[in-house]
Image (cartoon, rainbow, N blue to C red):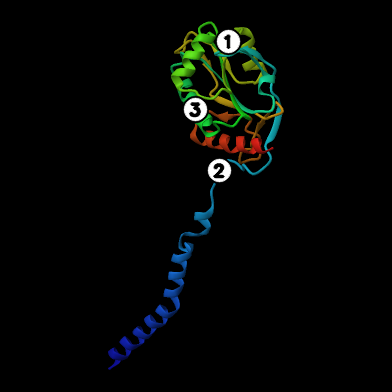
Amino acid sequence: MFKNKSYIGISFIVLIFGIYAVPKIVERLQTGGVVKGGRLDKVTTTANADEKLVAIGPAPEFKLTNQHDVSISNDSYKGKVYVLEFFFTTCPSICPKMNQNMLVLEQKFFGNPNFGIASITIDPGQDTAEVLKNHAELLGVKSSNWHFLTGDKAEIMSLANKGFNLYAAQNKNVAGGFEHSGLFALIDKNGMIRSRKDEFGNPILYYDGLDKNGIMDLQQDINILLRE
């Protein structure tokens, strides 16, 4: 007798739960609310891309020759947001990865006349305009605003180390004979170097050209500058 009463009580509770809860579950499934939640709705980044990007200072002036043997300077990028790197075509280490990540940026913003890329060789003795043109074709570069630049070696080294403060040097003891930073500089339409802040509120200055997260952050910040 007591068992029967227990079964009746349990059945009553299940019935009440069904009447109350099932319509709620169906409603959430229909509206998609079942997949929403505090943790699922949050997207985290390495820094706050919504904040105004920090102005580091004006990009140093340069005047070099591109892969089409055309003179290119700061004025060539006036009114454009652009990303700048130092590399060399025979680099056996980090340059191929940097070039591939630049290709990601080119493809992301392809067709936007207000975006450009500057890839400056630190081995101009080897990397003539013709060599740079062949290199660009090998990479599959399509944008007319991606300039591979060469010029006087001393001027380029000074531009890297003193101008942008991005390390570059000749070193016969390393593979390829040169070593350099794997960082990318971001320059706005007014020729100012810009960056986001890190988690401690300090400007990162430059973006990691070898890291997937660094490239994602860079894409976000290029978009911010294109809207300014």
Residue type at mark 2: give it: Thr
121 to 48, vertically: above or below: above
Dot 1 alpha-carbon crowd within 10 angstroms: few under 14, some 14 to 19, many 20 or more: some
Residue type at mark 3: give it: Leu
**SS category of the residue bearing label 2:** loop
Residue 154 lies, in percent from the top left, at 62, 8
Would you name the residue on which mark 2 appears? 45
Residue 103 numbered tag? 3
Would you name the residue on which mark 1 appears? 69
Count the numbered circles shown: 3
Q: Is residue 186 visible?
A: no
Q: CA distance from mark 3 to mark 1?
A: 22 Å
73 to 6, vertically: above or below: above
First-in-chain label (3 vs 2): 2
Q: Is residue 88 visible?
A: yes
123 to 47, vertically: above or below: above
The answer to which of 205 and 96 lies nearer the viewer is 96
Occupied quadrant, residue 145: top right
The answer to which of 221 and 228 lies nearer the viewer is 228
Q: Residue at x 60, y 26 (%)?
A: 116
Dot 3 alpha-carbon crowd within 10 angstroms: few under 14, some 14 to 19, many 20 or more: many
Q: Residue at x 67, y 31 (%)?
A: 194
First-in-chain label (1 vs 2): 2
Foreground disc of the pair 3, 1: 1
